[in-house]
Image (tube, grey):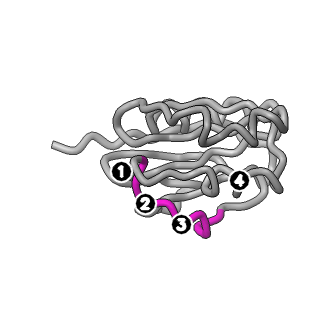
């Protein structure tokens, strides 16, 4: 049985926030997404072409360098998983925080940080 969760948080204007998540999807501002996704306060991007946590490479993390977030939250699906630090070394050297969480935790944490006007990015993998 699928358990869907709806999240409600007061937003600061036109910011993107997670409004729900469940098995194989997340919702941002009420729109459902079933593919890997990058969410920022001002935009939602589907051009991060990573489908599977096990396929992550250093180049996949380099994608975030030009976006210059304070922190990157990486949602690894239904279970928390950690990538090897060598894959995101460039982010560490750029003083960008990287946190690995299950997708539900990323949705909640992102919403809190974006409400505090923090420059946060959530990258969500569906598997």
Residue 16, percent from left and from top: 69, 52
Q: Is residue 92 magenta?
A: no
Kindly identify the residue that appears in the image at 84 percent across and 47 percent down.
Answer: 68
Q: Secondary structure at mark 1?
A: loop
Instruction: Please tell me how crowded label 4 is: few (under 14), some (14-19), or many (20+) other residues with Cα within 10 Å.
Output: some
- State the quadrant of the N terminus: top left
Kindly identify the residue that appears in the image at 79 percent across and 51 percent down.
Answer: 65
Above or below for 81 versus 15: above
Sequence-wise, the earlier of marks 1 and 2 is 2
According to the picture, the residue beneath numbered tag 1 turns out to be 127
Cα distance in 3D space between marks 3 and 2: 6 Å
Nearer to us in this view, 24 or 88: 88
Q: Are marks 4 and 2 in contact (CB under 8 Å)?
A: no
Give the label, 4 or 2, closer to the camera: 4
Nearer to us in this view, 70 or 26: 70
According to the picture, the residue beneath numbered tag 2 turns out to be 51
């Amino acid at each position: 049985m699928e358990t869907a969760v709806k999240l409600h948080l007061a937003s600061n204007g036109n910011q993107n926030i997670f409004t729900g998540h469940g098995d194989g999807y997340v919702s941002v501002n009420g729109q459902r997404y079933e593919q890997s996704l990058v969410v920022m306060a001002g935009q939602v991007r589907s051009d991060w072409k990573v489908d599977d946590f096990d396929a992550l490479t250093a180049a996949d993390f380099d994608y975030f360098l030009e976006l210059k977030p304070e922190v990157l939250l990486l949602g690894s699906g239904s279970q928390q998983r950690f990538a090897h630090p060598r894959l995101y070394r460039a982010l560490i050297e750029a003083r960008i925080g990287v946190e690995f969480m299950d997708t539900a935790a990323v949705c909640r944490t992102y919403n809190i940080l974006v409400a505090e006007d923090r420059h946060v990015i959530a990258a969500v993998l569906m598997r």
